[in-house]
Amino acid sequence: MSLEQQKLFIETLPYKPYCTDDLDSGLRIRPAKSALTKRLIQHNKLFLVSWIVLDLDSPFFWYLMDSRVLPPPNLVSFNPENYHCHIYYSLKAPVCRSNMARYKPLRYLAAIEYALCKKWGADHGYSGLISKNPIHKHWNTKQFREESWDLGELADWLPEL
């Protein structure tokens, strides 16, 4: 993984993210430095979306990626046993989702997230709270794009918007 994307992931983490090595044992809140040692981690701050993350529960990522009809993600973290993955799009301008947030950017983000999820065949039930930690050695992580995305750039790949 590129040092720039690794640095960006670390910089945008919550100060004390939820994290765990095993979902059956529950989530814990830990300082970011400690949380980065866990396999699963909260990737966005509570009221700020810096990463669009999709959960793809099939091994067909490479086939879809080769078709070149989908925007290349910044990062993808694979389970080495079954090749299920989390797909990460970093955003140039994070979107606020607090009760003070503007409605139009939230709707735009939701529409893009929905369209990406549909195109990738990702899990629509994924809560988006935690994801595979792309820094952790347990996952195979690949970078496909170094530059973060603007929502408009992502929308250009999704003609249905």
Image: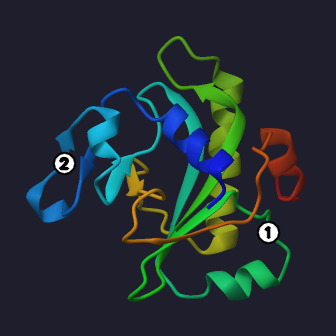
Residue 59, by quadrant, is bottom right
Which residue type carries mark 1? Leu
Q: Residue at x 54, y 61 (%)?
A: 54
Q: Where is 100 relative to 17, above or below?
A: above
Q: CA distance from mark 2 to mark 1?
A: 32 Å
Amino acid identity at mark 2: Leu
Count of labels in the image: 2
Q: Which mark is residue 144?
A: none
* Quarter of the figure with residue 133: bottom left
SS assignment at label 1: loop
Above or below for 110 versus 22: above
Residue plotted at (50% across, 39% down): 10
Label 2: element kind: loop
Q: Residue at x 65, y 72 (%)?
A: 120
Q: Is residue 146 above or below residue 103?
A: below
- The residue that label 1 is drawn on is 70
At which x and y percent is residue 46? Answer: 41, 28
Tell me, yes or no, if residue 17 can be seen here: no
Describe residue 91's horizontal placement relative to residue 141 as left or right. Answer: right
Residue 111 appears at what percent x and percent y? 68, 47
Image quadrant for the N terminus? bottom right
The residue wearing badge 2 is: 27
Q: Is residue 155 visible?
A: yes
148 lies left or right of 77: right
Residue located 46% across and 79% down the image: 84
